[in-house]
Amino acid sequence: MTEVMGLRERKKLETARRIVRTAIALFVERGFDNVSVQEIADAADVSKMTVFNYFGTKEDLVFRPMEDHFGDAARAVRERRPDESPVDAVRRQFLELVETRDPSVGLANEVFVRQLRELVLGTPALRDRVFLAAQKGTRDLAAHLAEETGDLMLATIAAAMISAARNALIEEHWRRADAGDQVDTIVADASERTACAFALVEQGLGDYARKAQ
């Protein structure tokens, strides 16, 4: 049975969204370091304390909408189906996110999402936090695989390869979007590209890019 969100919860969610969108708009306009939390609160018509109640730090205003997705690969493996390999699980989850045009895999028509990405890439402190969050996601995946297999070294290699394939696909989506491709166009061949990327992980590098004699 689906739980209906109460009025109080809806208002809290709406307030959080308003604060985030207000903050991102100000950051994009003036730069992350040039906007204070008080200015964000004033523009969103809330108190400074309310901002901190919803978001622990100024950086959280940017990362809260995306932070759960850094653990997507580990979650897919942890919740995978019986007799499903880690590679199969992450590939299946990735394609499900592609099907729904999820911004977390580089598919976004919304201007807000593009502004958020540009803000992160253009702000060293935020860019560093993305890197650390992504690394944590890979370490969490490795830890889970090690728990299952008992071999931390091989689990670390496997996690790095799975994460690298997934990240490369996402970057490819953003690259094509930046070049002017429409989301539907990118989605149209995502299945084939995803199959190629994860096949490389499954098969190992082997003869990949072997130099001709």
Image: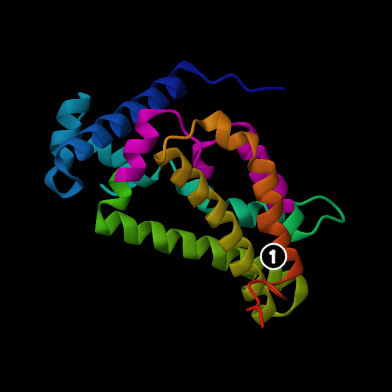
Q: Which residue does the image show at 35% across and 59% down from the upper left?
A: 129
Q: Give the magenta part as a residue range.
A: 89-118
Q: Which residue does the image show at 39% across and 56% down from the upper left?
A: 130
Q: Which residue does the image show at 41% across and 28% down from the upper left?
A: 110
Q: Which residue does the image show at 34% across and 40% down from the upper left?
A: 116
Q: Is residue 49 above or below residue 122?
A: above
**Front residue (pair 208, 53):** 208
The location of residue 59, given as percent across then percent down, is 29, 49
- Answer whether residue 55 is visible to the viewer in this image: no
| Magenta-colored stretch includes residue 113 | yes
The part of the image, by quadrant, that contains residue 16 is: top left
Outermost residue toward the right?
Answer: 83
Is residue 33 shown left or right of residue 62?
left
Q: Is residue 90 above or below residue 179?
A: below
Mark 1 belongs to which amino acid? Val
The part of the image, by quadrant, that contains residue 177 is: top left
**Front residue (pair 131, 54):** 131
| Main secondary structure along the magenta-highlighted residues | helix
The location of residue 166, given as percent across then percent down, is 59, 55
The location of residue 84, given as percent across then percent down, is 82, 55
Is residue 60 shown left or right of residue 169?
left
**Badge 1: few (under 14), some or many (20 or more) residues near its Cα, within 10 Å?**
some
Quarter of the rendering occupied by the N terminus: top right
Secondary structure, mark 1, is helix
Is residue 169 shown left or right of residue 37?
right
Residue position for label 1? 201
**Front residue (pair 72, 179):** 179
The location of residue 60, given as percent across then percent down, is 33, 47
The part of the image, by quadrant, that contains residue 199 is: bottom right
Quarter of the rendering occupied by the C terminus: bottom right
- Answer whether residue 5 is visible to the viewer in this image: yes
